[in-house]
Image: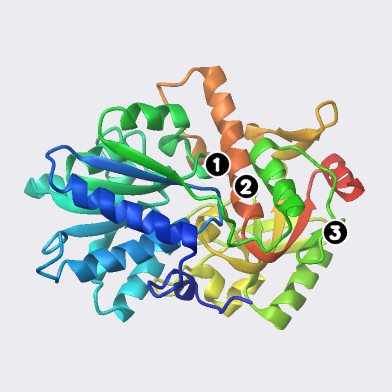
Amino acid sequence: MLENTATTKLAPETKLSAQQQALKQRVLQFCTRQLTTPQTGLFVIEGTAGTGKSVVLSSLMNSLQQARNDAASPFYQTNNYLLVNHPEMLKTYKQIAADQPNLRKKDFMKPTPFINQMTKHATYADIVLVDEAHLLLTKSDRYNRFNQENQLTEICKHSRVVILVFDTHQVLKMKSYWDQTKLAALLAEQPHEVFHLTQQFRVCAQPATQQWLTALGTQGQLLPRPTDPSFDLRIFADANQMYQQLRQRDHEYGLSRLVATADFPYKLDGQTYYVTAPGFRLPWDKNMDPNITWAERPETLNEVGSIYTIQGFDLNYVGVILGPSVTYDATTNRLKLLPDKYQDHEAFKRRADLTAQQALQVKQQIILNSINVLLQRGRYGLYLYATDPQLRAQLLAL
């Protein structure tokens, strides 16, 4: 079972698999070549949730920062950064930096402060690593003090080499909407390489179970539920019963949490807002600790986490509540997604570059992506409850 710390998983000393080690060496070779050329190089690490992308990035950052002190290294005195547009992930990276002799907290930043700092001083970084690059903004956002149109484009303008981790199935907002076409257009403008990680490290399940999770989370497809002694996959008719089982798993193994789709009202006004179902009522995650990630705090067993608190993290067991925007289409045997019922209104802020039909499709994709993120959190088990009666009945019948 996982230790109750996100820093353990991402620590630079974590042993890499053969595929991860090969990727790391390829990235270092790419960096060595590109540092000798005038054009910015872009290396894309692709992979679905749980394929160990962040672990590789953490190991790379540590090796680069160690090499910057070695006069015999091609990375001697290089100015390198790791960026992530995710407060909880940034918190984890800074915790790791505090315990590592080669790392400095100031080299770990969110993208907007990095872009604004580099622009203000008209300076460049040598190598920039970007975790969760699918969260980078693709339009201006006054709230985040980002005034340009694309964060990745701006990062490339101020970097000699950019290494980014990317998964189109984890895009969660219109303002950070990416697809393979958008990425391909940007890659075509500069020297680049792409590496696809395939080995699943998080979900300790047989291939049939992994296929079941992927089909539901990326296609909205309901496959027959597999029998798998290595992974505890359960569908519940009652949300409170699911929660009580999850509490028991947390007592036995630790790091077990309840999460939900953004289908229940929430505002940043200091009030407490609740996730509800018949016979069930728990508050949304709140009171973020600046130093400890949400899942590591014992009291959060009494809260419901969101995509924004849990993306990028592992749990031992996860309970997922699919809210009112997630229904069932019997004619296609797939999820039917209803953007009008989705409560994360910030995620759906209008984009002028999309038609109404395109915007609807993107909204539905964002809801599906959020489901995918939540389904892929548990290493040893997934407990699932749907508020929609028809979907719940169909899941129970699988």
Q: Is residue 268 visible?
A: yes
Residue 317 disc label: none
| Residue at 27%, 45% in the rendered image | 145
Residue 169 disc label: 1
Amino acid type, mark 2: Asn
Q: Earlier in the sequence, mark 3 or mark 2?
A: 3
Task: Report, in whole angstroms, how far the alpha carbon at label 3 lies from the one at label 2.
Answer: 22 Å
* Nearer the observer, 3 or 43: 43
Q: Position of residue 98 (x, y in %)?
A: 30, 78
**Residue bearing mark 3:** 238
| Residue at 72%, 53% in the rendered image | 207
Q: Quadrant of residue 42?
A: top left
Q: Quadrant of residue 177?
A: top left
Q: Are marks 2 and 1 in contact (CB under 8 Å)?
A: yes
* Nearer the observer, 247 or 228: 228
State the quadrant of the N terminus. Answer: bottom right
Q: Position of residue 332 (x, y in %)?
A: 80, 28
* Nearer the observer, 221 or 284: 221
Task: Report, in whole angstroms, how far the alpha carbon at label 2 lies from the one at label 1.
Answer: 7 Å
Q: Are marks 3 and 1 in contact (CB under 8 Å)?
A: no
Locate residue 320 relative to residue 333 in the image: left or right.
Answer: left
**SS assignment at label 3:** loop
Q: Earlier in the sequence, mark 3 or mark 1?
A: 1
**Residue bearing mark 2:** 372
Q: Residues within 10 Å of mark 2 (few under 14, many from 20)?
A: many
Q: Residues within 10 Å of mark 3 (few under 14, many from 20)?
A: some
Task: Report, in whole angstroms, how far the alpha carbon at label 3 lies from the one at label 1.
Answer: 29 Å
Q: How is the image coloured?
A: rainbow
Q: Is residue 112 visible?
A: no
Amino acid type, mark 1: His
Amino acid type, mark 3: Asp
Locate residue 169 relative to residue 163 in the image: left or right.
Answer: right
